[in-house]
Image: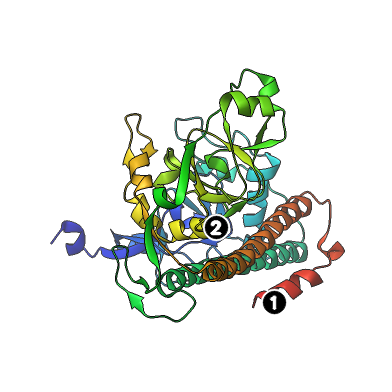
């Protein structure tokens, strides 16, 4: 036994800065360390304690609400405990969020070292407002209500994503016609389906980048797609645009319904960036264009590839420059299951499109709520508006619908 164990130290869960987020404590991974009884008492957490990060994103704060028993905290987290009953810790968690992320009033509060940190003395020296207790509480309750609605929207996105994964697995394993399955080299597929390589069903082409030094190439109306755009199943536009001359000399225009897939870049380390385009677009050299020869639609092709993304990602290799690369041979030889009935292709696509529309709706709701939270946080903390001025009936209705 170690000396710590012999002298009474016991494993004690403790919070790191990685557990403390703005207005949220993440307990999905909590470490333990041996602590003496007096250490546990000194470092114990009580409901209402305000936790503030010393390092990382300095000032990041959340209130401990007693989510678990016997939890302590490490040295890189500050614990603030109110001295009087006219202080609402939740209000100050939100105030610190606004002060550090919006208002910039604590610039320079962190020590000037290689790794910024907010020392105890610097934290204690920060000047903060002190509205009357009712105002503190009302501001905290309003922002908490918006945050709760944001969490509901985020959960709806996760549920819809899980529904899509399950639906795609069933659609590409069983189809829509209730026919028997057969074993194949890519797993079970409907009996009438065929296995095809991408080269068999697609024309695969490369893109390019017009010279950035020629301004005229970058003032046009043609969407120019790069890896940063491949974040949705279907693209209607791109961040960058080029002119017809720019496309002619330095890029290539893919027709509507083409599938664009990232084949080089660090984006491949996390997911498979792949999108179908809804109109003609140019694209850069880090992407490949998969243009269907007519056997399947672009929407079906994109979904069929993404459904087997783990198999395709397993073919990715690091290049000489350290970035991730999907070689052309591996892309061309990649196999998917293809229905022989065009109506089944259309039906599968329509089903996935309906789920994608639901996911997009929840993501847009989430984005609106995030913007509402940022706006309210700023305006309430600067006194631009008061809680009494707010009408949150629409927010309450949204909570009821989400629930």
Q: Which is closer to the viewer, label 1 or label 2?
A: 2
In the image, residue 382 above or below residue 30? above
Q: Which residue sits furthest top?
A: 213
Q: Which residue sits furthest left?
A: 1
- Callout 2 crowding tier (Cα within 10 Å): few <14, some 14–19, many ≥20: some
Q: Position of residue 88 (x, y in %)?
A: 66, 63
Q: Residue at x 46, y 71 (%)?
A: 171
CA–CA distance between discs 1 and 2? 35 Å
- Kindly state the secondary structure of the residue where label 1 is placed: helix
Q: Mark 1 or mark 2, which has the lower sequence index?
A: 2
Picture quadrant where residue 15 is located:
bottom left
Given residues 139 and 21, the one toward you in this image is 21
Given residues 252 and 351, the one toward you in this image is 252
As drawn, is 19 to the left or to the right of 277? left
The residue identified by callout 1 is 401
Picture quadrant where residue 215 is located:
top right
In the image, residue 109 above or below residue 295? above
Q: Position of residue 116 (x, y in %)?
A: 49, 36
Q: Residue at x 19, y 63 (%)?
A: 5
Q: Position of residue 334 (x, y in %)?
A: 36, 52
Check the picture and name the quadrant holding the C terminus.
bottom right
The residue identified by callout 2 is 297
Answer yes or no: is residue 327 visible: no
């Amino acid at each position: 036994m170690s000396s710590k164990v012999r002298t009474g130290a016991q494993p004690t869960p403790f919070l790191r800065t990685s557990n403390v987020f703005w207005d949220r404590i993440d307990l999905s991974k909590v470490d333990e360390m041996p602590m003496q009884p007096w250490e546990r008492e000194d470092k114990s957490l009580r409901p209402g304690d305000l936790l503030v990060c010393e390092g990382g994103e300095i000032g990041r704060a959340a209130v401990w609400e007693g989510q678990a028993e016997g939890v302590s905290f490490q040295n890189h987290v500050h614990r603030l405990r109110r001295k009087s009953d006219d202080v609402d810790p939740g209000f100050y968690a939100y105030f610190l969020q606004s002060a550090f992320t919006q208002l910039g009033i604590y610039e320079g509060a962190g020590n000037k070292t290689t790794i910024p940190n907010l020392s105890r003395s610097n934290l204690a020296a920060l000047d903060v407002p002190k509205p009357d207790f009712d105002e503190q509480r009302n501001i905290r309750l309003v922002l908490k209500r918006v945050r709760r609605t944001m969490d509901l929207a985020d959960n709806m996105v996760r549920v819809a994503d899980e529904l899509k994964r399950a639906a795609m697995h069933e659609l590409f394993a069983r189809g829509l016609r209730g026919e028997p399955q057969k074993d194949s080299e890519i797993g079970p597929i409907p009996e009438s389906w065929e296995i095809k390589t991408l080269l068999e069903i697609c024309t695969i082409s490369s893109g390019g980048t017009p010279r950035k030094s020629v301004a005229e190439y970058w003032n046009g109306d043609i969407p120019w797609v790069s890896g940063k755009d491949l974040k949705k199943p279907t693209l209607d536009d791109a961040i960058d645009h080029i002119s017809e001359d720019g496309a002619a000399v330095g890029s290539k225009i893919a027709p509507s319904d083409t599938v664009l897939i990232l084949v080089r870049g660090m984006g491949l380390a996390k997911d498979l960036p792949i999108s179908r385009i809804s109109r003609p677009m140019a694209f850069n050299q880090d992407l490949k264009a998969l243009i269907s020869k007519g056997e399947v639609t672009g929407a079906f092709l994109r979904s069929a590839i993404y459904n087997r993304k783990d198999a395709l990602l397993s073919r990715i290799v690091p290049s000489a420059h350290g970035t991730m690369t999907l070689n052309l041979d591996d892309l061309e030889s990649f196999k998917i299951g293809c229905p022989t009935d065009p109506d089944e292709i259309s039906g599968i696509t329509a089903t996935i499109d309906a789920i994608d529309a639901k996911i997009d709706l929840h993501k847009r709701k989430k984005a609106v709520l995030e913007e509402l939270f940022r706006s309210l946080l700023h305006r309430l903390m600067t006194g631009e508006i008061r809680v009494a001025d707010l009408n949150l009936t629409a927010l309450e209705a949204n909570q009821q619908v989400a629930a």
